[in-house]
Amino acid sequence: GEKRLAAMGGERVKITVPVLALLLVAFPFLLNDPFYRDIGVAVLLAAISASAWNIVGGYAGQVSVGHSMFFGIGAYLPLLVYQHGAWAPVIGVPIAIVLSVGLAAAIGYPTFRLRGHYFSMATIAIAELIHIYVGTVDYLGAAIGLQGPAVGRGWWDLTFRGELPYYYIFLGVLAVLLYVTYEVQRSRFGSYLRSIRANERAAASLGVPVRETKLKALMLSAAFTSVAGSLYSLKTGFIDPESGFGLLVSVQMLI
């Protein structure tokens, strides 16, 4: 009976996923009004952010409320390289990923000594310190923020007049993220994450490298959260401390 239910569930997934993917691909043409396309882009960005957070918050059960620090780094770097170097904003995306992963490694090692709401409070504190600091640095635009190119100099500036290119770029990133998450879930690493979420002490007693596993999950989550931030600033062409590093950014991911 259980095998039959599992098989039925697997069949439903095999049918549902392609249908959902087809609907997402066709959405801009089914509802081709600019308003609905803009809503579609916002939904995809929310899905990317939430799925990135889910790697550490869902699978590992480590409730971070400070993911805005990674989102903000991703949002600032593309516009920062444009403002101070006149480079294509997209060049800032890989730089932001590297910085976000480095920050995740730096803060993960000490904060993962804490558990439960103590870990959550620590992530809030670090994110808010970064938020306040960014708002005081003139090189980063201080409280005013940074502006991107008003008119694209070429396709590499990713400054499009319509929502359609952004929609498919965001959809492609979401597809990659969900595929990576799927592979993580099937791997031994994914099993370690689930065991930590279920009972951290029991997992450690069975030989699971708890801190190392949580750190890897945070670094992977930070990388994709940084990409979400970059997509946001590339589309809007503007970023300031509140929209990049504000506490509400982290809360929205949780919601």
Image: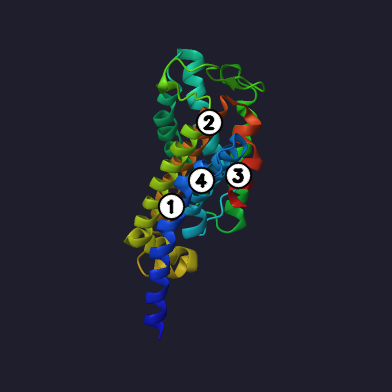
Labels 1 & 4 near each other (Cβ < 8 A) = no
Q: CA distance from mark 2 to mark 4?
A: 26 Å
Residue with the mark numbered 2? 75
Percent across and percent down for residue 174 are: 44, 45
User: What numbered label is drawn on residue 27?
Assistant: 4
Label 3 and label 1: CA atoms lie apart by: 27 Å
Mark 1 or mark 2: which is in front? 1
Q: Do labels 3 and 1 touch, CB within 8 Å? A: no
Question: Which mark lies nearer to you, 3 or 1?
Answer: 1
Q: Secondary structure at mark 4?
A: helix
The CA distance from mark 3 to mark 4 is 28 Å
Which of the two discs, 1 and 4, labels the residue nearer the N terminus?
Answer: 1
Q: Is residue 38 left or right of residue 222?
A: right
Tag 3 near tag 2, CB within 8 Å: no
> What amino acid is labelled 4 in the image?
Phe
First in residue order: circle 1 vs circle 2 = 1
**Label 1 to label 4: alpha-carbon separation:** 10 Å
Q: Position of residue 206 (x, y in %)?
A: 37, 70
Name the element at disc 3: helix
Question: Secondary structure under badge 2?
Answer: helix
Circle 2 packing at 10 Å, graded few (<14), some (14-19), many (20+), is many
Looking at the image, is mark 2 or mark 4 earlier in the sequence?
4
Decide which of 66, 163 is in the foreground and name it. 163
In this view of the protein, can residue 91 be seen by the observer? Answer: yes
Q: Are marks 2 and 4 in contact (CB under 8 Å)?
A: no
Q: Nearer the viewer, residue 78 or 130?
A: 78
> Residue 238: image x %, image y %?
59, 24
**What residue is rendered at 47% in x and 59% in y?**
59
At x 61%, y 17%, the residue is 138
- Residue that carries the numbered disc 1 in the rendered image: 21
